[in-house]
Image: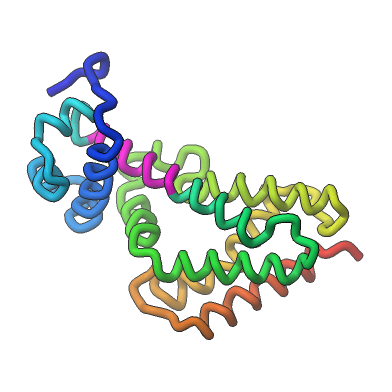
Amino acid sequence: MATGTELRQGSPAKRAAIVRAALEVFVREGYARASVDAIAATAGVSKRTIYDYYGDKEQLFLATVRETVEQQTAAFERLLDDTVGTAEDLEGALVAFGRAFATEVARSPQRSALLRLMIAEAAHFPQLLERGGATGGTQRALADRLADLAARGLLDVADPMEAAEFLGVLVTGRVHNHSWYGTVMLDDAEIERLATGGVEVFLKAYRPR
């Protein structure tokens, strides 16, 4: 087993395959039951490669969560760029964002799997909750965008992080509840209704008067 000073960065493609396989196995089996052998077989790599890249199962688990969260945050930032952009039509932009994000939340097996995994293992790995856990990066990205909209006079936002948390909950909270965290498929009309309603409530609170 490799020590911390001997870990290799290795091939990006191989690391991505290991992370995908590890997430699949950890979600299916839980941390305690998951084996490095099963992860290696699923990824199509040797067990030695996993040890060379990550050291041990615990570090692999934490790296899998961290790297998956980073990927999801980067995708969320692209979604913000595509939907909110310069936001000349504030309500239309936020509805487009809410609909797209709610659809991703409702229909992304990876996002739902990661959230269920972190909830299941947080008691054993409190570091999973550092910096906001699975949603910390997306909340900060959304807060930055809301702060920009406030600076342009389109929103009245005293605390961007709080406003981002409210918008996130309003857009995704009922989607999580109605879909049982990605277990039940929601149709487009239901997602549209839930997301639009959330944005309407948000704007009632944060639109300048």
| Residue sticking out furthest to the top | 5
Placement of 1 over or under 132, stated as above or below: above
Is 97 or 184 nearer to us in this picture? 97
Residue 87 on image: x %, y %: 75, 60
Residue 84 in view of the camera: yes
Instruction: State which region is magenta.
Output: 58-71
Pinpoint residue 4: horizontal percent, then vertical percent: 26, 18
Q: Main secondary structure of the magenta part?
A: helix
Would you place residue 98 above or below residue 35 in this image? below
Q: Is residue 205 left or right of residue 134?
A: right
The number of discs equals 0
Q: Is residue 112 left or right of residue 207?
A: left
Magenta span includes 65:
yes
Q: Nearer the viewer, residue 196 or 11?
A: 11
Query: Is 68 colored magenta in this rendering?
Result: yes
Looking at the picture, how far across and down is residue 135, in whole percent? 50, 50
53 over 120 or under it: above or below: above
Identity of the residue drawn at 25% across and 36% down: 60
Q: Is residue 35 visible?
A: no
Residue 8 position by quadrant = top left
State the colouring used for the structure image.
rainbow
Q: Quadrant of the C terminus?
A: bottom right
State the image coordinates of residue 16 (x, y, percent, origin top left).
28, 42
